[in-house]
């Protein structure tokens, strides 16, 4: 189907136009409504549209996704020559429910998978 902006609406991408807010309803009519934007925490790996589709179908393990973000932040801080302990303490501010040693174990481990 084609939206009013002449964009193709791909059914595989969750029935949303990838260029505007057009959506296909259950009767296959094009409707325009503000769709909720999901903040893609892994834009370096997948596009926002793919993340939104995978997230919509609960294909992410939330803990693994959190750990991936923590590792990414840790690597970035270490590349800025921040001391290991200072980097972990800074990350801990975003995750106060985790202990220092838990964050350290997550950040320095090699294994990282995000999908279930």
Image (cartoon, grey):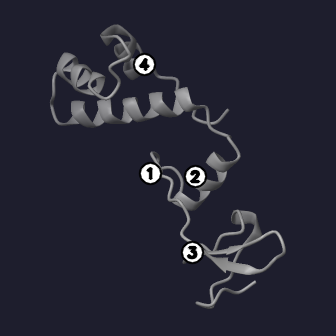
Q: Secondary structure at mark 2?
A: helix
Q: Nearer the viewer, mark 4 or mark 2?
A: 2
Q: Residues within 10 Å of mark 2 (few under 14, many from 20)?
A: many
Q: Are marks 4 and 2 in contact (CB under 8 Å)?
A: no
Residue where numbered disc 2 is placed: 51
Q: Quadrant of residue 105?
A: top left
Q: CA distance from mark 3 to mark 4?
A: 38 Å
Query: Is 64 drawn above or below residue 99 in the view shown?
Result: below
Along the polypeptide, which appears first: circle 4 or circle 2? Answer: 2
Quadrant hosting residue 7? bottom right
Count of numbered labels shown in the rendering: 4
Residue that carries the numbered disc 4 in the rendered image: 106
Determine whether 21 is above or below 77 in the image: below
For disc 1, the marked residue is: 44
Query: Looking at the image, which residue is at 52% across and 23% down?
Result: 111
Mark 1–mark 2 Cα distance, whole angstroms, equals 11 Å
Tell me the tag on residue 22.
none
Q: Which residue is mark 3?
A: 21
> Which tag is nearer the camera, tag 3 or tag 1?
3
Q: Nearer the viewer, residue 94 or 108?
A: 94
> In what quadrant of the picture does the N terminus appear?
bottom right
Q: Nearer the viewer, mark 3 or mark 4?
A: 3
Distance between the Cα atoms at labels 3 and 1? 24 Å
Image quarter of the C terminus: top right
Marked residue nearer the N-terminal end (2 or 3): 3
Q: CA distance from mark 4 to mark 1?
A: 20 Å
Residue at 38% in and 17% down: 97
Q: Secondary structure at mark 3?
A: loop
* Picture coordinates of residue 42, whole percent (x, y): 47, 46
Nearer-N-terminus badge (4/1): 1
């Amino acid at each position: 189907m084609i939206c009013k902006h002449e964009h193709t609406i791909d059914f595989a991408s969750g029935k949303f136009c990838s260029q505007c807010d057009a959506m296909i309803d259950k009767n296959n009519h094009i409707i325009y409504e503000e769709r909720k934007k999901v903040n893609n925490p892994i834009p370096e790996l997948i596009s926002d549209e793919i993340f939104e589709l995978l997230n919509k179908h609960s294909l992410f393990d939330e803990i693994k996704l959190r750990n991936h973000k923590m590792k990414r932040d840790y690597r970035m801080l270490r590349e800025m020559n921040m001391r290991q302990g200072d980097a972990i303490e800074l990350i801990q501010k975003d995750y106060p429910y985790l202990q220092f040693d838990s964050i350290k174990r997550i950040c320095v481990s090699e294994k990282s998978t995000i999908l279930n």
